[in-house]
Image: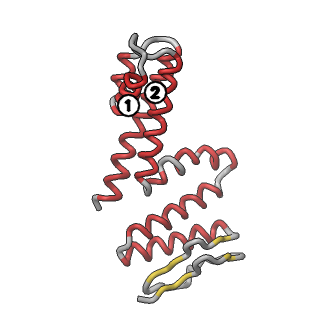
Amino acid sequence: MVMYGLTGHRIHGNAWLSFLKVKGELSFKDTIFDDPKGQEKCCRNAKSTWEKVGDRDKADYYFYREMEVKRKQKHFIMRYVEIIVQYPLGYGVYPYRLLFSFIIVFLMFAFIFWIIGGVFTNNTLINNLRFSFLTMIIPVYGVINAKTGILGLFTIIEAIIGAFTWPAFLVIFTRKYMR
């Protein structure tokens, strides 16, 4: 199989490759593009090439790079709002990144509950860890069992984050390992 591409180089100007018919593998790993549109098109071509070859991991790498540069081309405000999608969710490519984000969020909320005064009368860190974890997995659990006031507000925020995080992890994990 023939390997095409530039690995670890810098491309100045346009590199659209619209005329190129690739038979084999196409790689732009660690390549720096000065033209965002060129990076988007090159990564899209590389992604398609790796999908045809059957290497899903490399196709996912180029999909991530394509989506990253598409985000950077958007309006200033949207560019930074979408960082929430890029880093914790990894554009659906990196399930362990989302799992790590899930663990950080539930530990952070457990610590907040413990510092503020706890959700339960027996204010131990382990009780707050259990409460925080169950709120992330089953959002209704936290909303039903929470106290009112600031703890109730934090519980609702954690339940909303959990309502999106856990299903997203299941979808990303399934997509990554069950295809």
Q: Residue at x 50, y 67 (%)?
A: 62
Q: Nearer the viewer, residue 26 or 40?
A: 26
Q: Quadrant of residue 50?
A: bottom left
SS at mark 2 in the image: helix
Q: Nearer the viewer, residue 69 or 7?
A: 7
Residue 89 pos. (x, y %):
47, 49
Q: In the rendered structure, are the residues bearing label 2 and label 1 in contact, judged by CB atoms less than 8 Å apart? A: yes
Q: Residue at x 41, y 67 (%)?
A: 57
Q: Residue at x 49, y 27 (%)?
A: 111
Label 2 amino acid?
Ala
Q: CA distance from mark 2 to mark 1?
A: 8 Å
Q: Which residue is mark 2?
A: 110
Residue 134 pos. (x, y %):
34, 28
Residue 143 pos. (x, y %):
39, 20
SS at mark 1 in the image: helix
Label 1 amino acid?
Phe
Instruction: Judge the density around disc 2: few (<14), some (14-19), many (≥20) Cα neighbours within 10 Å.
Output: many
Q: Which residue is mark 1?
A: 133
Q: Which mark is residue 15?
A: none
Q: Nearer the viewer, residue 71 or 101?
A: 101
Query: If you read the primary sequence from the N terminus, does the residue marked by circle 2 or circle 1 appear first?
Result: 2
